[in-house]
Image (tube, rainbow, N blue to C red):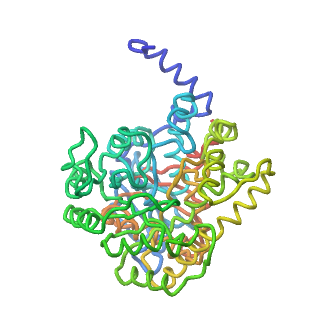
């Protein structure tokens, strides 16, 4: 059906479609133009480059950047002009916006592409809300670790979106995580690596898939980083790259000014990453050695693991714990997860309703088939869901504890930790955008990471690791005004992130109540 020449009819249809999923406010939400001045008066600044807070100061923002930080004066409201927005910061804390450096933004979480096609109203509601959900929980900057310019353009095509950057995914041809039917998988991975001696698929020029060529294409496409993988999979038969291949990838990336991130959740993979010279290890240690089942074995740090972690510290390699990754599958068996009232703030009501349908449970049902086949967890026929939940929790506690213990060790010994959530790490609804970041903050705190360390992980450390620290990560004159106004000091308590007063994106002051999925229309 064509809507050419029928704009009013199209607008009416879009409005009705939005109303059905409760998203009419997306079409009417007023925008604050970039360039409008913002003055925050008598506020306390907490920024990771300073040892102590800076109290009672005024902050001026113009054209989306901080233009001055000065001692607080009695009142500047009369001098700000009619276009300025003035915020009284008394009793509040101004901090950098949070950075989640490990997200995946291409799909609607928990939906396959064919399901999006069958439910366009639900998909529209989700794609409009999810950027706001990240902002709602304070994430003003995101790094998608496996994306393309086309996927980024789709993500950014909304009225409010966090500043978003991407890495190119340099997967080994037919290795993890490449999947799906051939030749479509090769189209889906434009930056795949083909090693010497391996025959290229029909129609593909192998010279365009060397490490040097792949990095050059990523750089030209606007990527800020390179993501690669070392993963044998649960069955231990997935091909992995040769050491020299990743060393060449690292050399090419560093010449292009791009950091390299390695997917590495085992001790073998992290040893490989340190040998290859990567900059960031994505994921915590879920297994200590190759022959240790992911669902069993010791969770206490062994001498060999301590040696591995100490080497990473000595080499100043950054580490993303992503503790919440394992919950993406675990919480699909949580019988009360979809009843969590916090979900209503992050996920549109129509999508939450769909998740609870038989169709929406597709990934849960798929895991019920796959996990027994891979000898991970057995599911007795006719078992009560509550009993299944308890057994899944028991089986998954070991890898989670390993990740927590390794993270705590790094936090206590000067490790370079980065905040990332791997949202979503699987086609699961159990890692809701934005809210999953708040869950990760709590997991890190439970693991023994201090509030001050978490604050630095999610601000300056992330900005430095991805070469963004000239723009974001601290509250400084000249930097982008991606900021948060909080009621408490986040270096003292993680509770500060649960009471965000304002989210400031490129100088625009946003009310969290206007960002929630269940806001009043």
Percent of width and height locating residue 355: 65, 41
User: Considering only vertical position in the picture, is 520 above or below 307?
Assistant: above
Does residue 345 appear to the left or right of 312 in the view shown? right
Percent of width and height locating residue 292: 56, 72
Residue drawn at (42%, 14%), measured in percent from left and top? 2
Q: Is residue 28 visible?
A: no
Does residue 437 appear to the left or right of 152 in the view shown? right
Percent of width and height locating residue 306: 48, 85
Q: Residue furthest bottom?
A: 303
Does residue 427 appear to the left or right of 357 in the view shown? left
Q: Quadrant of residue 203?
A: top left
The answer to which of 185 and 409 lies nearer the viewer is 185
Residue drawn at (33%, 40%), measured in percent from left and top? 187
User: Considering only vertical position in the picture, is 174 above or below 454?
Assistant: above
The answer to which of 437 and 219 lies nearer the viewer is 219
Q: Quadrant of the N terminus?
A: top left
Percent of width and height locating residue 226: 32, 59
The answer to which of 178 and 153 lies nearer the viewer is 178
User: Considering only vertical position in the picture, is 174 above or below 261?
Assistant: above
Q: Quadrant of residue 261?
A: bottom left
Does residue 367 appear to the left or right of 169 in the view shown? right
The answer to which of 491 and 90 lies nearer the viewer is 491
Q: Quadrant of the C terminus?
A: top right
């Amino acid at each position: 059906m064509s809507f050419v020449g029928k704009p009013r009819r199209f607008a009416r249809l879009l409005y009705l479609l939005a109303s059905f999923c409760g998203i009419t406010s997306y079409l009417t939400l007023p925008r604050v133009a970039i360039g409008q001045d913002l003055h925050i008066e008598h506020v306390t600044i907490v920024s990771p480059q300073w040892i102590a807070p800076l109290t009672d100061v005024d902050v001026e923002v113009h054209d989306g950047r901080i233009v001055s930080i000065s001692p607080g004066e009695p009142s500047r409201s009369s001098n700000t002009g009619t276009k300025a927005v003035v915020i009284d910061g008394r009793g509040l804390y101004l901090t950098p916006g949070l950075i989640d450096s490990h997200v995946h933004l291409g799909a609607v979480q928990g939906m396959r592409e064919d399901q999006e096609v069958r439910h366009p109203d639900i998909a529209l509601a989700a794609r409009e809300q999810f950027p706001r959900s990240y902002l709602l929980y304070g994430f003003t900057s995101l790094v998608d670790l496996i994306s393309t310019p086309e996927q980024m353009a789709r993500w950014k095509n909304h009225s409010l979106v966090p500043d978003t950057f991407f890495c190119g995914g340099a997967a080994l041809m037919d290795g993890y995580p490449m999947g799906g039917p051939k030749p479509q998988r090769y189209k889906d991975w434009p930056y795949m690596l083909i090693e010497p001696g391996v025959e290229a698929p029909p129609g593909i020029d192998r010279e365009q898939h060397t490490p040097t060529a792949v990095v050059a294409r990523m750089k030209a496409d606007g990527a800020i980083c390179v993501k690669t993988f070392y993963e044998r999979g649960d069955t231990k038969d997935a091909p992995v790259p040769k050491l020299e291949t990743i060393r060449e990838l690292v050399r090419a990336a560093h010449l292009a000014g791009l950091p390299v991130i390695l997917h590495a959740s085992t001790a073998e993979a992290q040893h490989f990453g340190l040998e290859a010279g990567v900059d960031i290890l994505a994921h915590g240690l879920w297994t200590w050695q190759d022959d240790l089942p992911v669902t069993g074995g010791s969770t206490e740090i062994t001498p060999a693991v301590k040696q591995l972690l100490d080497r990473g510290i000595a080499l100043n390699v950054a580490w993303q714990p992503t503790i919440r990754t394992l919950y993406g599958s675990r919480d699909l068996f949580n019988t009360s997860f979809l009843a969590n009232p916090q979900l209503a703030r992050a996920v549109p009501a129509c999508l939450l309703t769909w998740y609870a349908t038989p169709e929406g449970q597709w990934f849960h049902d798929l895991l019920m088939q796959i996990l027994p086949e891979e000898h991970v967890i057995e599911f007795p026929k006719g078992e009560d869901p509550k009993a299944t939940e308890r057994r899944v929790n028991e089986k998954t506690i070991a890898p989670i504890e390993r990740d927590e213990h390794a993270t705590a060790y790094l936090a206590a010994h000067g490790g370079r930790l980065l905040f990332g959530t791997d949202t979503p790490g699987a086609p699961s609804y159990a890692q809701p955008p934005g809210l999953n970041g708040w869950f990760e903050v709590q997991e890190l705190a439970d693991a023994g990471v201090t509030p001050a360390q978490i604050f630095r992980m999610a601000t300056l450390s992330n900005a430095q690791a991805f070469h963004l620290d000239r723009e974001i990560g601290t509250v400084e004159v000249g930097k982008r005004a991606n900021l948060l106004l909080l009621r408490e000091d986040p270096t003292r308590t993680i509770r500060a992130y649960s009471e965000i007063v304002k989210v400031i994106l490129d100088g625009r002051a946003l009310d969290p109540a206007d960002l929630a999925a269940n806001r009043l229309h």
